[in-house]
Amino acid sequence: MKYLIAAIVIMAMMIGCGGQKDAPAMKSESHAGMQMAKAEASGEKLIYYTCPMESHKHIHSAEPGECGECNMKLVPGVITTEDKMEYWGCPMLIHSHIRHDAAGRCAECKMELKPMRLKQS
């Protein structure tokens, strides 16, 4: 009986320790979740992270990070109100490079463009 209990305790410890290597990913998800909550609290909806340089607008990510071309910190691209907007953009992550001066539809997916802006930290 002692050996069975010892085996169960050891297995539980092994399973518990195995979950520790996933902790950094959970931290990243937690950070992204906090950023999304901040954006939504201000009446804006986080869509993606992108490089603030116009020439790197094709760089996008679902998570915060750095631009792969210039190493600048990615900034949140959010759907906002028309009075705060910087451009009309496609709400799809993979179409973050679609940015126009007027309302319309995305040339790639035909979704309606939304008023968007980049939130500088």
Image: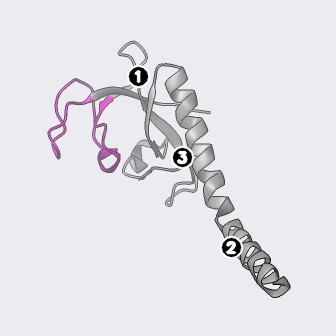
Q: For the residues carrying marks 2 and 1, which lies nearer the camera in this image?
A: 2
Alpha carbons under labels 2 and 3: distance apart? 35 Å
Question: Left or right: where does residue 120 sit relative to residue 117?
Answer: right
In the orientation shown, which residue stands out farthest toward the front?
Answer: 1
| Whole-percent x, y for residue 101 in the image | 27, 26
Q: In which quarter of the image is the N terminus?
A: bottom right
Q: What element carries label 3?
A: loop
User: What residue sits 41% from the left and 42% below the top?
Assistant: 54
Q: Which amino acid does label 3 sit on?
A: Leu
Q: Give the range drawn in magenta.
A: 88-113
Q: For the residues carrying marks 2 and 3, which lies nearer the camera in this image?
A: 2
Q: What element carries label 2?
A: helix
Alpha carbons under labels 3 and 1: distance apart? 18 Å
User: What residue sits 46% from the left and 45% below the top?
Assistant: 50
Kindly identify which residue carries mark 3. 74
Q: What element carries label 1?
A: loop
Kindly identify which residue carries mark 1. 80
